[in-house]
Amino acid sequence: MIPDKRMCKLVTHIKRKPELRNLDSMYVAQRLQDRIESYPRAIVKLEHENSYSRVLRCKEVRAMIKDVRAELRHNYGMFKNNKSHKVHRFLNRLAEKLEDIDIFSEESIYFHKQLLRCHKSTKERLDDYSRLYSELFNITGRPRAILDLGCGINPLSFVFMGLKSVEYTAVELAKQDCDLMELYFNMAGDNCRGKVLQMDLSEEIGFPEAEVCFLFKILDVLESQKRGISRTLLNTIESDWIVVSFATRTLSGKEICSERRWFKELLEEYDYDTLELDNEIFYIICNRALP
């Protein structure tokens, strides 16, 4: 049995990389636990070696740590960019401005754009957000309640939705992004009445009802962790519409040629429309009985 203190030290060590330091420790521990059985020599070293420094010098322990970090970067770290550290500064400036200006004003939207540039996925959508939401809501209707799963900082795009008042539930794993969204919802007030839930979507099921649910670029990540989780999620979500998106190009710009047969099989159970941007395809899925 590997001592709990040693596992805690390993989690801390894995999170030393700047792009991973804000991840929830329980999530990192779970990813470590999922991988550790593939490294039997690492288990022996962790159980019986008294010196932790010698544990870290073990070749198989180092390989395991590298493997876990690679998974975490794929699942979360790759979406951060070199402006992520500026987000608090931009958010503070937006908070100051909103004391005197309307949230939909040109100056407010300027600061929203600066914030959305701090995350790679939202930066990619920045020039298309208005078109995206206009076309989405032409199909779904203008929602009064939105559920955003694996949201990152996407709730900041609220100003492009053309909605004057909405109940917004943001679900995210990373504590840093959860804290940011709490701050933002407090600033937005009655325009965007928000609630933030910190959850691991691969482990926890059960969400508030909504009219529209966003699952932007998250199902590929979840399926890589737990095959079949997408079907469970879609069956659990209580909303009239579910909007699922996938990247069509990598973050470096290369075209993605994945067939995603597992998702095509899921779609056979629903009526849906599609919308395609330069780097992303959206499936607007009807999740209610049609008249």
Image: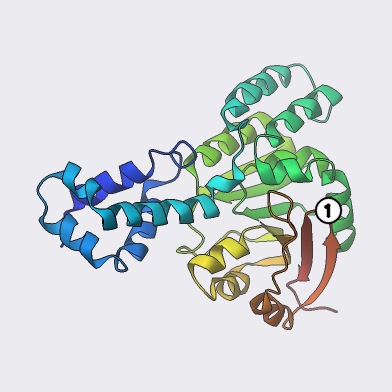
Q: Quadrant of residue 259?
A: bottom right
Residue name at image x 74 percent, y 46 percent: 166
Q: Quick check: can you spot residue 163?
A: no
Q: Nearer the viewer, residue 279 or 60?
A: 60
Q: Nearer the viewer, residue 222 or 257?
A: 257
Q: Residue 183 at what x, y percent from top left?
A: 58, 31
Q: Quick check: can you spot residue 188?
A: yes
Q: Amino acid at mark 1?
A: Asp
Q: Which part of the image, by quadrant, shows the N terminus? A: bottom left
Residue under circle 1? 278
Local packing at callout 1 (Cα closer than 10 Å; few below 14, some 14-19, many 20+) is: few
Q: Is residue 18 above or below residue 197?
A: above
Q: Is residue 115 above or below residue 192?
A: above
Q: Is residue 277 above or below residue 86?
A: below
Q: Which part of the image, by quadrant, shows the C terminus? A: bottom right
Q: Is residue 259 above or below residue 24?
A: below
Residue name at image x 65 percent, y 34 percent: 118
Q: Quadrant of residue 12?
A: top left
Residue name at image x 54 percent, y 71 percent: 229
